[in-house]
């Protein structure tokens, strides 16, 4: 066990865990930030997507010991009132079906738009490629990303 001082959603959080613990379990089990979902555990589905230093990463494969001083943002910290442009677009387009994958989808979309405010169709597909949706909401996801970017046709 070791103690880690992490910056998560703008707050310092101290956790005492094995250094090999994936951030997914630090967030869910130790900090009760359960918006980040477990899907596959092997970086294949995207349901656990969070931001590390502003970049979308898979929390299931990110060990707590590799985070260092980089800031972590989870779906709980994306906005104060659920009013991030991506969240508003998700509501407007009514994207979710069962909802399980959607926190990860939103975190990937938000990271995309932070780094590329007006992505092309191809860039959206590339950025969202690793986020699987069993309900097949891909068309609405793409539309919502374009809406959030202000480029919906
Ligand atoms: S649970 Fe992390 S990518 Fe599937
Ligand atoms: S909305 Fe059901 S898995 Fe994506």
Image (tube, helix red, strand yellow):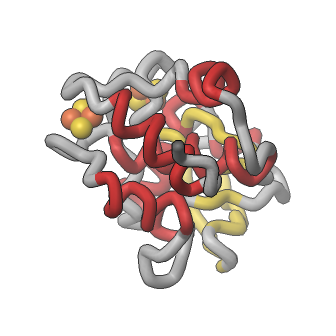
**Residue 20 shows in this picture:** yes
Total marks in image: 0
- Residue farthest toward the front in the current orientation of the protein: 153
**Residue 14 image-quadrant placement:** bottom right
Q: Nearer the viewer, residue 31 or 117?
A: 117
On screen, residue 136 versus residue 82, left or right, reads left
Is residue 22 something one can see in this rendering?
A: no
- The residue closer to the viewer here, 126 or 142, is 142
Which residue occupies 31% across, 27% down? 133
In the rendered view, tell whether residue 12 sits above or below residue 142. Answer: below
Residue 31 image point, x, y percent: 44, 66
The spot of residue 106 in percent (x, y) is: 47, 49
**Residue 151 at x, y percent in the picture:** 62, 48
Q: Nearer the viewer, residue 109 or 57?
A: 109
The residue at the point 69 percent across, 30 percent down is 120
Question: Quadrant holding ligand 2?
Answer: top left
Q: Residue at x 54, y 47 (%)?
A: 152
Q: Would residue 75 be found to the left or right of residue 127 on screen?
A: left
- How far from the left and from the top, in percent, is residue 44? 46, 16
Left or right: 85 as drawn, with respect to 12: left
Give the residue at x 38% y 55%.
Answer: 90
The correct choice, above or below, for 72 with respect to 62 in the image is below
Q: Residue furthest right?
A: 69
The answer to whether residue 138 is above or below residue 78 is above
Res 112 quadrant in image: top right
Residue furthest to the bottom in view is: 81
């Amino acid at each position: 066990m070791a103690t880690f001082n992490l910056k998560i959603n703008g707050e310092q959080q101290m956790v005492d865990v094995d250094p090999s613990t994936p951030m997914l379990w630090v967030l869910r089990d130790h900090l009760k930030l359960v918006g980040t979902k477990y899907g596959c555990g092997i970086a294949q589905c995207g349901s656990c997507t969070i931001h590390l230093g502003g970049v979308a990463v898979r929390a299931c494969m990110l060990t707590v010991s590799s985070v260092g001083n980089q800031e972590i943002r989870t779906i709980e910290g994306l906005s104060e009132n659920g009013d991030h442009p991506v969240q508003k677009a998700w509501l407007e387009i009514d994207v979710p079906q069962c909802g399980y994958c959607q926190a990860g989808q939103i975190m990937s979309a938000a990271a995309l738009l932070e780094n590329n405010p007006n992505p092309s169709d191809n860039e959206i597909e590339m950025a969202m490629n690793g986020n699987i949706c069993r309900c097949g909401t891909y068309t609405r996801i793409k539309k919502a990303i374009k809406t959030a970017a202000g480029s919906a046709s």
